[in-house]
Amino acid sequence: AQTVTQSQPEMSVQEAETVTLSCTYDTSESNYYLFWYKQPPSRQMILVIRQEAYKQQNATENRFSVNFQKAAKSFSLKISDSQLGDTAMYFCAFMKPEFNYGGATNKLIFGTGTLLAVQP
Amino acid sequence: KAGVTQTPRYLIKTRGQQVTLSCSPISGHRSVSWYQQTPGQGLQFLFEYFSETQRNKGNFPGRFSGRQFSNSRSEMNVSTLELGDSALYLCASSLAGGLGANVLTFGAGSRLTVL
């Protein structure tokens, strides 16, 4: 079974600085997807970034980028120029496409989350 | 474009009762998934529906059930509520089909408290 581990329960960063959130996972699969989701205090989960395992190039989305190390099964998130609005719980998630009725199913396996506080 | 809508947002029940939660997906999304979020167990997958069919299920007892209607709206039901069912229940919708992973869009959740 796949597992996702986030070893940093809480982190703090000063506004405008850079912070890196860690995530490791365990799987024997070769084809899978990794995600970072953000859950602000309002509770709406928002997709931050997504990475396909077959792509060696690290995904980037504006101030957010990942360091994907497939052999090490590591998937860290870097947030540059941190903003107060980045304060949230960040979840790392794993998805293995399981083909069923209608196509690939969408079962996410989440880590326990990292609570990031951006300080003014 | 409206997002994923979950109702009710908050509810309080007592042990032994049952509850029904509703989820309206983004227009055009045919897949609806449900997750339970608790401080102790984190985020756990409950089940996924596509075209009125359950196509994936997590490790939850049979007290947890769901269904999807022809307009893709989904409901989940928990019968014989236990204190441990207190949680935030999140619904997520996505475009279905294809061979790759679809991006899930989550609703704001339904906060269930069991007394």
Image (cartoon, helix red, strand yellow):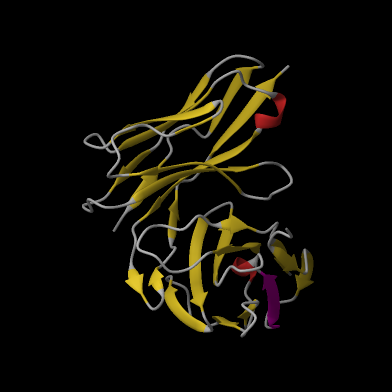
Residue at horizontal 62 percent and vertical 21 percent from the top: A82
Can residue B62 be seen?
no
Residue A87 appears left or right of B40: right
Residue A108 higher or lower than B67, as above or below: above
Q: Is residue A2 magenta?
A: no
Residue A34 higher or lower than B1, as above or below: above
Residue B88 sits in which quadrant? bottom right
Q: Name the spot of residue A61 as percent of width and height, x first.
A: 52, 33
Which residues lie in the magenta part? B17-24
Q: Between B80 and B2, which is closer to the camera in this rendering?
A: B2
Q: Between A31 and B61, which is closer to the camera in this rendering?
A: A31
Residue A73 sits in which quadrant? top left
Q: Name the spot of residue A102 as percent of width and height, x first.
A: 41, 76
Question: Which quadrant would the N terminus of chain A be assigned to in this image?
Answer: bottom left
Residue at horizontal 63 percent and vertical 80 percent from the top: B77
| Predominant SS along the magenta part | strand
Residue B83 sits in which quadrant? bottom right
Q: Is residue B20 magenta?
A: yes
Q: Name the spot of residue B72 as percent of width and height, x first.
A: 61, 77
Can residue A107 be seen?
yes
Residue B39 appears left or right of B59: right
Residue B25 appears left or right of A79: right
Residue at horizontal 37 percent and vertical 58 percent from the top: B100
